[in-house]
Image (cartoon, helix red, strand yellow):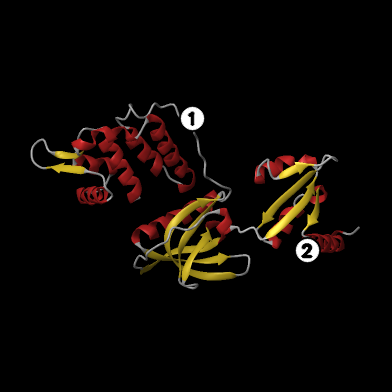
């Protein structure tokens, strides 16, 4: 949780004329030695912090940067606090709420108390997700390998990974790390992990590239799709692809066009619409749906 603590220390320094290492240590429940290392880290990041020794001394941001104390407006602080609060919805604890309370202490000029943004990152998998995140965060901080069983569309496999980032994207949580089995950086969906554990083996940190999370990179559109939908499912198309993904025909149906990631996911998605979708392109999708319906008739009769 070092990053969270650094944000908290910076917030205190922006709000107060001066503080001391013992005060910060008590506030964030760590040792004075840890606070000293945190101050060094902030200095290395370019924050001009001055430490004065002796009576009347303390820790403060240098005078030349007094104007930058307005760097966090009330609205910006509210955004930070909303983000911190949202993490408790998946962490299974009140860690971030407690940090938020510490940031709010003595900061009436920044925090009005009138929250207008509430974020809930929890999911149906809340009971299993929180322990996984806790294990991974601990492994990232202590530089320990993690091991787990992973379920992918292609197969099941045992993985040993150097964990680097927890990522929330596409309404799910992912891990970005170096896979020892694939000898490369990989993205793993937490919901597909099982038997996750932090091992006793530590690793040396690599030069970690920031993952490219653009839709074009992760979900390349390789399948061109044209489908006629019944008007009753317009809400789904707007919800999943936006209001510009279709045009209304003279007959009142919706002509949907898009570039989809792969054929398997496309067919699965189209089948959820039942008789309310007529595939025009690609022909392979029509053939697969026809075959699936034929096999289903064998099971259910008719």
Residue farthest left in this picture: 54
Secondary structure category for the residue under label 1: loop
Figure check: 242 above or below 198: above
The disc label shown at residue 225, or none: none
User: Which residue is at 52% across, 41% downward?
Assistant: 120
Residue 60 sits above or below residue 284 on the image: above
- Nearest the viewer among 175 and 197 is 175
Residue in the picture at 73% in, 44% down: 246
Give the percent coordinates (x, y) of residue 300. 85, 59
In the visual, does 151 lie left or right of 87?
Answer: right
Q: Which percent across, then down, holds residue 245?
A: 69, 45
Query: In the drawing, does residue 146 fall left or right of residue 122?
Result: left
**Alpha-carbon span between mark 1 and mark 2:** 48 Å
| Callout count | 2
Give the labeled residue for mark 2: 284
In the picture, the quarter occupied by the C terminus is: bottom right
Residue at 38% x, 59% y: name it. Answer: 140
Tag 2, which secondary structure? helix
Residue 166 x %, y %: 45, 55
């Amino acid at each position: 949780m070092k990053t969270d603590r650094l944000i908290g220390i910076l917030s205190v320094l922006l709000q107060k004329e001066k503080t001391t290492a013992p005060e910060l240590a008590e506030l964030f429940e760590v040792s004075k030695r840890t606070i000293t290392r945190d101050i060094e880290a902030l200095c290395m990041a370019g924050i001009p912090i001055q430490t004065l020794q002796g009576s009347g001394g303390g820790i403060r941001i240098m005078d030349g940067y007094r104007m930058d104390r307005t760097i966090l407006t009330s609205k910006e602080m509210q955004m930070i606090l909303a983000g911190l609060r949202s993490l408790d919805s998946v962490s299974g604890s009140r860690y971030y709420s407690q940090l938020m309370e510490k940031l709010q202490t003595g900061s009436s000029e920044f925090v009005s108390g009138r929250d207008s943004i509430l974020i809930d990152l929890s999911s149906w998998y809340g009971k299993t997700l929180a322990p996984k995140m806790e294990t991974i965060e601990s492994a990232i901080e202590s530089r320990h390998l993690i091991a787990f069983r992973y379920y992918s569309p292609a197969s099941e496999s045992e993985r040993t990974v150097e964990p680097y980032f927890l990522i929330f994207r596409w309404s799910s949580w992912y891990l970005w790390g170096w896979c020892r089995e694939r000898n490369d950086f990989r993205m793993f969906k937490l919901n597909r992990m099982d038997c996750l554990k932090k091992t006793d083996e530590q690793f040396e940190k690599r030069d970690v590239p920031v993952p490219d999370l653009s839709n074009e990179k992760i979900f390349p559109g390789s399948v061109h799709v044209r489908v006629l939908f019944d008007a009753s499912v317009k809400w789904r198309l707007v919800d999943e692809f936006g209001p510009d993904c279709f045009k209304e025909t003279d007959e009142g149906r919706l002509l949907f066009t898009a570039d989809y990631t792969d054929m398997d996911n496309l067919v699965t998605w189209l089948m959820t619409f039942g008789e309310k979708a007529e595939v025009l392109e690609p022909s392979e999708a029509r053939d697969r749906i026809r075959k699936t319906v034929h096999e289903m008739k064998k099971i259910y009769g008719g």
